[in-house]
Image (cartoon, rainbow, N blue to C red):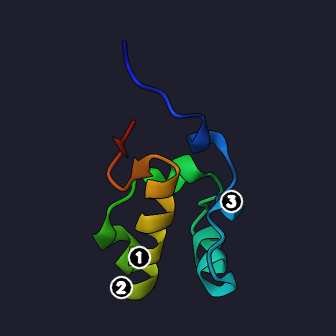
Amino acid sequence: MKKYNNNIEKKIEVLELEKDVLNILKDNDIKLVGDIWVLNRKRLKEMGITDKDIKYIVIRLQLLGLDLNKKMYN
């Protein structure tokens, strides 16, 4: 049975990111946690997000049981 995490359907605001990071994501049509979950660090950097903010995004995703590159945890 394939794992599924309902958090991928939530809006990115649940990650409680800084306003400027949220604006960058929204400008790149990233509106749901699932939209950011499929990305990798390189793509986030290309959008203009700093290493510090990428690390924070990873931590917030991990708290939801997710990680970049479509990784999912129990």
Q: Residues within 10 Å of mark 2 (few under 14, many from 20)?
A: few
Which residue is nearer to you in this view: 21 or 63? 63
Lateral position of residue 72 relative to residue 36, left or right: left
Split into 4 quadrants, where in the image is the C terminus? top left
Gap between marks 1 and 2 measured at Cα? 5 Å
Residue 38 drawn at (x, y percent): 40, 50
Amino acid at pointer 3: Val
Report helix, strand or loop for mark 3: helix
Q: Residues within 10 Å of mark 3 (few under 14, many from 20)?
A: few
Q: Against 72, is 47 above or below?
A: below
Q: Against 1, is 55 above or below?
A: below
Lateral position of residue 28 relative to residue 58, left or right: right
The dot on residue 14 is 3
Residue 13 drawn at (x, y percent): 70, 63
Residue 11 drawn at (x, y percent): 69, 53
Q: Earlier in the sequence, mark 2 or mark 3?
A: 3
Total numbered labels placed on residues in the image: 3
Report helix, strand or loop for mark 1: helix
Amino acid at pointer 2: Asp
Amino acid at pointer 1: Ile
Q: Which residue is mark 1?
A: 54
Lateral position of residue 28 relative to residue 65, left or right: right
Q: Are marks 1 and 2 in contact (CB under 8 Å)?
A: yes
Q: Which residue is mark 2?
A: 51
